[in-house]
Amino acid sequence: MSKKMAVIATKGTLDWAYPPFILSSTAAALGYDVEIFFTFYGLKLLEKDLDLKVSPLGNPGMPMPMPVPVLVQALPFMQSFITSMMKKKMASKGVAPLDELRELCLEAEVRFVACQMTVDLFEMDTNNFVDDVTYAGAAAFFEFAGESDITLYI
């Protein structure tokens, strides 16, 4: 039997979108059977158009080229500025774009499961999601996660 890895993706910002896809694609490449359960804001990672932003607010661990006071981080243009800065940094270091990592997961047969309760709660249009998404509740995720060797909450 192959090893299993279950991932819960709960965040919908650019910086939090990378870990579930990097870890899942790596695990799949190592032969793991992988499932990502997207819930709450993590459902943003399933949208066809990945127009995700980085929020500097409430993220004191974010490395910045210079100290930026919280008041300045709250200015309307800062989110776009920080997002642009992060994308340039990732590109300069050879980090694959998010849509490529997501596609790599799908090619590696990582299962994408959208939390049906959250989709209903936020009245999300599933036509905006990529293909190959399964819709299920927490019980279905527990069935897979209960048999997994690794379970990650991201």
Image (cartoon, helix red, strand yellow):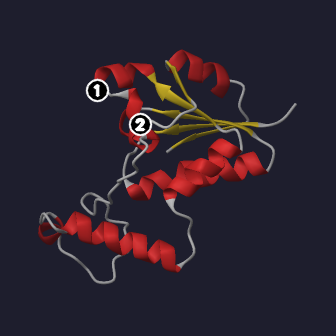
Which residue is depicted at the point 14% across and 71% down? Answer: 72
> Percent x, y for residue 126?
40, 28
**Is the Cβ of the residue at disc 2 closer than 8 Å to that at disc 1?**
yes
The residue at the far bottom in this view is: 66
Position above or below: 26 against 81: above
Which residue is pictured at 35% across the width and 53% down the height? Answer: 51
Residue nearer the viewer, 69 or 140: 140
Mark 2, residue position: 43
From the viewer's side, name the closer residue of 97 and 13: 97
Kindly identify which numbered label has been placed on residue 40: none
User: In terms of sequence position, does the residue under pointer 2 or pointer 1 come before the other?
Assistant: 2
Q: Residue 138's spot in the image, x, y percent?
A: 50, 20
Name the amino acid type tagged 1: Phe
Q: Secondary structure at mark 2?
A: helix
Read off the residue under disc 1: 122
Q: Position of residue 71 (x, y in %)?
A: 11, 68
Q: Residue 6 appears at what percent x and percent y? A: 63, 35
Q: Is residue 32 left or right of residue 73?
A: right
